[in-house]
Image: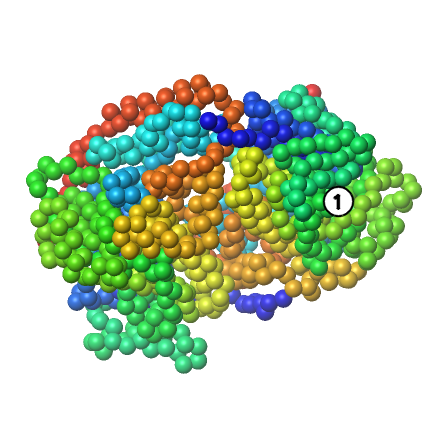
Amino acid sequence: MNQQANQPSEQVKKIVIVGGGSSGWMAAAAMSRHLPSSVSVTLVESDQIATVGVGEATIPAIRTFNAGLGIDEAEFMRETNATFKLAIRFENWGNIGDAYNHAFGFYGFPINDVSFQNYWLKMKQSGLDFPIHDYNLAYAACDQDKFARKQFDPNSADSRYFYAFQFDAGLYAQYLRKFSEKNGVTRIEGKVEQVTLNEHDGFIKSISLESGQTIDGDLFIDCTGFRALLISEALNVKYKDWSHWLPVNRAWAASTKYPSKDSSIPPYTRARALTAGWQWRIPLQNRTGDGNVFCNQYISEDEARSQFIDNVEGDLLNEPRLIKFTTGKREKIWHKNCVAIGLSSGFLEPLESTSIYLIQASVLQLIRNFPNMNFSDTSRNEFNHQMNYRYEEARNFLILHYHATEREDTKFWKYCKNMSIPDELAHRMKLFKERGFVAGQKLDLFSEHSWLAVYFGQGIVPAGYDPRTDNVNNEQIKSFLERMRTDVQLALKQMPSHNKTLESFCRGELISKL
Amino acid sequence: MTQDTIKKIIIAGSGLTAWTAAIAIAKSFLNTELSVVVLGDETSHEEAPYLLPQAMAFHRHLEIDERVLMRATDATFSVGTQFEDWNKKGHNFFMPFGPHGSVTEFIDFQHFAIKSKLSNSFDGAYEDYAFATAVAKAGKFMHPQNDPSSLLSTLPYSINLNPTKYLSLLKNLAKQIGVIEIAESIGEVNLEKEGAFIQSIESTVGNLHEADFFVDCTGQAAQLLGQALKTKYTTWSQWLPMDKKVSYETTTESPLKANSKITGLDAGFLRSHSNQNTTIHEISFCSAETTLEATLKQLGFIEDELTSVEKRTFSSGKRENQWVDNCIAFGEASVNFPSLEVSKLQLVQEDVMRFIQLFPNKNIEPSLSHEYNRVTERRYNNLRDYLILNFVFSSRSESSLWQDIKRSDYPKSLSDKMRLFREHGKIAFNEDEIFMHQHWTAKFIGLGYWPINYDIFLDKFNFQELQENFVRMRNAIQQAIPQMPDHEDYLKQGLG
């Protein structure tokens, strides 16, 4: 048997978070909300280092995180200029001219425990051909810029959807900073000059700032973004490059202003595929965030910049700035006494707004698998195992968007269409192609309905469907489906516009002056 | 255009496994063209079905009314399992289906227990914080209530039914919904091409039975999946060396408690399963270590004095794949193990339902079997670890069986789980567990394997207040018991 510890271990007393931004302050907020007062949390950041802050769009899991902190949703939305988000709208992905929403809503209802898409597929084969998206309320709401704030209820036709937010990540960090400082987090302003390791075990002993101050800690959280000051520079944990699957590696980012005060604000993020990447548009209350993500092997930085400006709608509020990255993940997100959270742990590109989710998952998993001074490999392995799974699932879901395409109009798309993909994704795609079956696991972030949205949206049509659909005769199926479709239309009619919901729920003062 | 569906499925076998598969499949395709045939006439001995609370949902799915089921099968209720003389003589603990204590915000109950124990202030035994333990010990039972504020909402239950009676009930119900029985023994299995795809089964009387899909419920022989399709068997006997099983029946004694009982023996264990009238006792032991005679003697029996003694040989392990080409195996043809807190039939129910989710069309889409097999592999391995764990902490010295199990290298997944629990009181997450984290926790602690650390996040809460809360909870459990009916009376009134 393995050697066994027999004595209780000393508790971790001092957590040092290096770097602010959304990752640093999300970690600080959650730690300070839940940890006993015997543990101190210190966050070191420098006002001179800008945060990347591309991650302005989120997925519904963010609501669980905020709720865990006890944050009031209306206040949070006002403070961060947030809008509601029901979907990501993908244009030109499966093919040029295609468009679909990956909405956070459910497709139809199951009949006799058999998922909806099977009945839809069967009816489609016998000629009834309403688009599957007609059965998804959140999808339809996006097409009309509508939004109603509802609690998810799988049993009622008008509440079978989740929502997320589009917000100013910088303001979110500020908001969480206030929260954290109120909960006793000490913020130290300063740039880290040196990281000192213990000689005997290579653990991080302390960090020294430019000011000369030295900060000791038991557990260090690396939120230094792409620099990965602790996990990479100090501890040499390698980066696993995934750019053969997700080749984009640059982004131009800027903000635009709305044409008028009454411009309709869409409840979704837009992702338009271009020649060697894609362009985002994230609507906030007071402005939009825009960017062009591309791969510099297929388009130069200058060309991409012009492409960005040509495609952007509305007047730019600032000069586009260039962000460079490599998609991938740190081999070990937690190594020795250092946990990387945020961009230091990996980056998957912003296509499905997973960055903030991965921060949230890391923070939660760290709380769930919190170490003691023994720093044995058990909790670290469990944490790394759980985070690896989450990174890989998100990665696979992203690869699906590039790979399931008919496009071969540029070298970039030719590559994506023909590249080899991870086995897990290949298996899932095969299951869907052969039988319309959506495979999933408990730890998955993306539900059956998210996979359905992208599979169908990217033009995959299954060859078969669940044979249990034969239990219901076609006339009955038709009338069930018709009922579901009309229920969506009725619910849609009742739904107010997104602007109206924002107005009544959380109209912000224009806090962020740009 | 419609897809080409499977029109005929043959289930080879004649026992509970075969009829469970038959009724579940037939029910799921009731109004389709699928015909379900059960082919076989062996009368095999049935293991006492040791079912988990999930079995209640399975029967609801089949639309078998619980009262009808219980009356027809002489069944009793069960809220968990009493382990006796386990690590050594006198070591007893209770494994409830339901929870222990309650969660403090997001921190599981065991962390409170660990913290209390470290300061020598843990009041009572861990099992005392589970409502089911008190219910079982007092011989009580009533159905759980929906009111989440009531202790009774925390009482998941299962039933202990008589296998022979259950078989005839399932058979009758299955035939009522169109399942065809062909009582002929299985002879040759004909393949379509070399080593792949079953075309037909020839019975020993010479009839040829063709189908689109075949289900192997032929028990350990695995006549289809193993013998015909040559699917290899992975053995677990280095960890689970029991290889003999003997069963006998006695009359059920009063008071009839709502739980099963497992008693440790020198080279194996005895499992007792009470129906209303008869109690089935099953001894699993390792024949390299002891004889049946000695084992029975340990229990105070002489073989000749017992009526209807059934003896069987088995070997723990699993088939490498459960679904190959157009053939899937359930029950002992797919996996075998000594039945501790769960018997093969529980797995059969869940496996069949998973198969139905992935039911193929005539072209037998290859991705479906791949999906089924990989999930099954995870489920079986998780269960294997859970079973091995039961024998890890034994300090019995009577025989080398328990010591051998202790000394062998456990699967890494189990030793990782043990270390994480020991050091942090947490259960490592695995996909597709049959036993949830609270059961793993209760098992570890029941076996005396206490963690040395608790979750630091518990320190956020006032410890004295927590202690007072949990004392109140224990008191509430004790106070609720006298209000409940006796299990025996409840059976008589409820089902009479």
Q: Is residue A463 left or right of residue A48?
A: right
Quarter holding the C terminus of chain B is top right
- Parent chain of label 1: B
Q: Quadrant of residue A204?
A: bottom left
Q: Which residue is disc 1 drawn over?
A: B221
Q: Residue B165, percent across and down?
A: 74, 28
* Viewer-side residue, A161 vs B89: A161
Compared with residue A439, is residue B168 higher up or lower down, i.e. above or below?
above
- What SS does tag 1 mark? helix
Q: Residue B123, percent across and down?
A: 56, 51
Q: Quadrant of residue B234?
A: bottom right
Q: How many marks?
A: 1
Residue that appears at 43% across and 55% down: A422
Compared with residue B127, is residue A359 higher up or lower down, i.e. above or below?
below
Q: Residue A426, percent across and down?
A: 45, 50
Q: Quadrant of residue B33?
A: top right
User: Is residue A180 visible to us here?
Assistant: no
Residue that appears at 38% across and 69% down: A238
User: Is residue B286 visible to us here?
Assistant: yes
Compared with residue B109, is residue A261 higher up or lower down, i.e. above or below?
above
Crowding at label 1, few (<14), some or many (≥20) Cα neighbours within 10 Å? some
Q: Is residue B98 left or right of residue A72?
A: right
Q: Amino acid at mark 1?
A: Ala
Residue that appears at 66% across and 44% down: B193
The colour scheme used here is: rainbow
Q: Residue A301, percent across and down?
A: 19, 61
Residue at the far right: name it.
B304
Q: Is residue B310 left or right of residue A474?
A: right
